[in-house]
Image: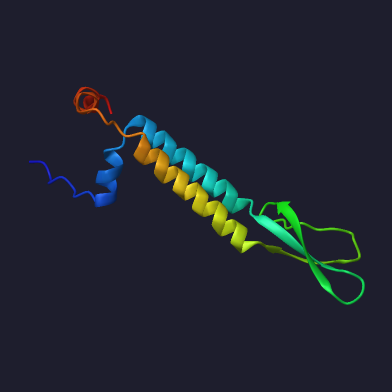
């Protein structure tokens, strides 16, 4: 006697309905999003020499090693959370667009190739 089959969640059911192109687009989108999360965009606070401070872009750097400088006017570095949120939103939006756009639109193709997933 076999035990009953385990119930699958709605997320698992949705993932099992993806075709190969959709799966590849989803994985690529997740990888790119994680790479941007591990290497965020930084900015540096610098003293301008007369008592004021200036915010200077420092580019993408690994999260564990923020940008540093031997410059006397370099004060501290911070992650630019606004740019981070915009980049992640664009990555998520493009991933959703590609996954939904790469679905099989032809019923015959779905019936024929559905067995090869």
Rendered residue at 20%/28% (across/down): 107
Rendered residue at 72%/56% (across/down): 65
Q: Which colour style is shown?
A: rainbow
Compared to residue 103, the image places residue 82 above or below, namely below
Number of callouts? 0
Question: For residue 17, what is the image quadrant?
Answer: top left
Locate the N terminus and report the quarter of the image it occupies. top left
Extreme residue in the bottom direction: 51
Relative to 116, 88 lies left or right:
right
Locate the C terminus and report the quarter of the image it occupies. top left
Residue 78 screen position, x and y as percent: 70, 64
Compared to residue 57, the image places residue 29 above or below, namely above
Rendered residue at 67%/52% (across/down): 62
Residue 42 screen position, x and y as percent: 70, 58
Compared to residue 37, the image places residue 113 above or below, namely above
Relative to 78, 49 lies left or right:
right
Closer to the camera in the image, 47 or 40:
47
Compared to residue 53, the image places residue 67 above or below, namely above
Residue 13 screen position, x and y as percent: 24, 45
Relative to 114, 89 lies left or right:
right
Closer to the camera in the image, 68 or 84:
84
Question: For residue 54, what is the image quadrant?
Answer: bottom right
Relative to 12, 86 lies left or right:
right
Residue 82 screen position, x and y as percent: 60, 62
Extreme residue in the left direction: 1
């Amino acid at each position: 006697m076999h035990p009953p089959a385990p119930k699958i969640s709605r997320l698992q059911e949705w993932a099992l309905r993806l075709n190969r192109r959709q799966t590849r687009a989803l994985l690529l989108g997740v990888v790119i999003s994680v790479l941007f999360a591990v290497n965020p965009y930084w900015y540096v606070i610098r003293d301008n020499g007369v008592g004021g401070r200036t915010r200077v872009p420092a580019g993408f750097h690994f999260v564990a090693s923020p940008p540093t400088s031997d410059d006397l006017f370099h004060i501290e570095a911070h992650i630019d959370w606004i740019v981070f949120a915009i980049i992640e939103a664009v990555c998520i939006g493009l991933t959703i667009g590609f996954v939904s756009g790469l679905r099989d639109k032809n019923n015959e193709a779905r019936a024929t190739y559905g067995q090869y997933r």
